[in-house]
Image (cartoon, helix red, strand yellow):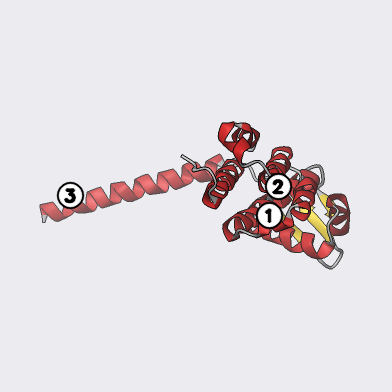
C-alpha cells in the first residue's frame, strides 16, 4: 500500500502507470490516477503520465512528442521512465511508418518523411532498420530516394512438405542403420 506523504509513493504510482502504458493498457491509466489513492498524489507528474497514456492509446507519435515536450521535466527526471518512454517512442514511430507506407508499393522516402512530419534523416534509418528487423519486406533505393515495398511472401506448401519428407527420410535411414548394427 502507498504511504501518504512519501516521494516513493508518487514514483510507485508513476511506475504503475508506466507499466499499464507499456503493456498496452493505456486506458487503465486514467482509472489508476483517478482512484482514491491516485487523487492524493494528483499533480503535474501524474498529468504527464496521463498525457503519455493518451498518446499511446491514440497511437499518435505527434501527440506523444507534444506530451514529451510539454512535460519534459517530469518525464526525464527518472531514468527508468525516460528509457521506457524512448522505447515507446520507437514503437509509435514504427507503427506510424507502417500505417503510412501500407497503401504504397513504391514511394519516395521524402514523401514518407513529409507525411509523418519528421526529417528524412530520421525516417530513412528507421525504415532501413524496420526492413532488417523483418517488420515489412522491401528495399531502400537510395540512388532514386525510393522505398520499394514487396508483398508478404506466401508460404510455399510444396517446400514445407518437401522439408517434412526429407526429415522423415532421415529418421527412416537412422532407424535402418540402428537395425543393421544390431544384426552385425
* Tag nearer the camera, 3 or 1: 1
Q: Extreme bottom residue here?
A: 143
The residue located at (73%, 57%) in the rendering is: 72
Label 2 Cα neighbours within 10 Å, binned few <14 / some 14-19 / many ≥20: few
The residue located at (63%, 57%) in the rendering is: 82
Query: Where residue 98 sits: x, y (%)?
Result: 74, 47
Q: What element carries label 2?
A: helix
- In the picture of the structure, the residue carrying the numbered disc 2 is 44
Q: In this view of the protein, which residue sits in the foreground, 4 or 98?
A: 4
Residue 179 badge: 3
Q: What element carries label 3?
A: helix
The residue located at (53%, 49%) in the rendering is: 6
Disc 2 and disc 1: Cα gap in Å?
7 Å
Label 1 Cα neighbours within 10 Å, binned few <14 / some 14-19 / many ≥20: some
Relative to 11, is 141 on the left or the right?
right
* Tag nearer the camera, 2 or 3: 2
Query: Where residue 3 sits: x, y (%)?
Result: 49, 43
When asked about the image quadrant of residue 114, the answer is bottom right
Label 3 Cα neighbours within 10 Å, binned few <14 / some 14-19 / many ≥20: few
Judge whether 122 appears above or below 12 on screen. below
When asked about the image quadrant of residue 33, the answer is top right
Query: Where residue 172 sits: x, y (%)?
Result: 29, 46
The answer to whether the residues at label 2 and label 1 have Cβ atoms under 8 Å apart is yes
- In the picture of the structure, the residue carrying the numbered disc 1 is 74
Question: Which sits earlier in the primary sequence, circle 2 or circle 3?
Answer: 2
Amino acid at each position: 500500500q502507498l504511504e501518504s506523504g512519501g516521494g516513493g509513493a508518487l514514483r510507485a504510482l508513476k511506475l504503475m502507470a508506466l507499466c499499464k502504458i507499456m503493456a498496452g493498457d493505456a486506458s487503465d491509466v486514467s482509472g489508476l490516477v483517478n482512484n482514491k489513492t491516485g487523487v492524493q498524489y494528483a499533480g503535474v507528474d501524474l498529468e504527464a503520465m496521463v498525457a503519455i497514456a493518451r498518446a499511446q492509446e491514440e497511437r499518435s507519435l505527434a501527440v506523444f512528442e507534444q506530451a514529451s515536450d510539454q512535460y519534459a521535466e517530469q518525464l526525464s527526471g527518472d531514468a527508468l521512465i525516460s528509457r521506457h518512454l524512448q522505447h515507446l517512442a520507437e514503437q509509435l514511430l514504427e507503427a506510424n511508418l507502417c500505417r503510412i507506407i501500407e497503401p504504397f508499393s513504391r514511394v519516395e522516402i521524402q514523401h514518407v518523411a513529409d507525411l509523418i512530419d519528421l526529417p528524412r534523416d530520421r525516417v530513412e534509418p528507421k525504415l532501413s532498420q524496420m526492413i532488417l528487423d523483418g517488420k515489412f519486406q522491401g528495399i531502400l533505393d537510395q540512388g532514386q530516394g525510393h522505398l520499394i515495398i514487396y508483398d508478404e511472401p506466401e508460404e510455399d506448401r510444396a517446400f514445407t512438405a518437401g522439408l517434412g519428407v526429407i526429415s522423415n527420410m532421415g529418421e527412416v535411414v537412422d532407424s535402418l542403420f540402428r537395425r543393421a548394427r544390431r544384426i552385425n
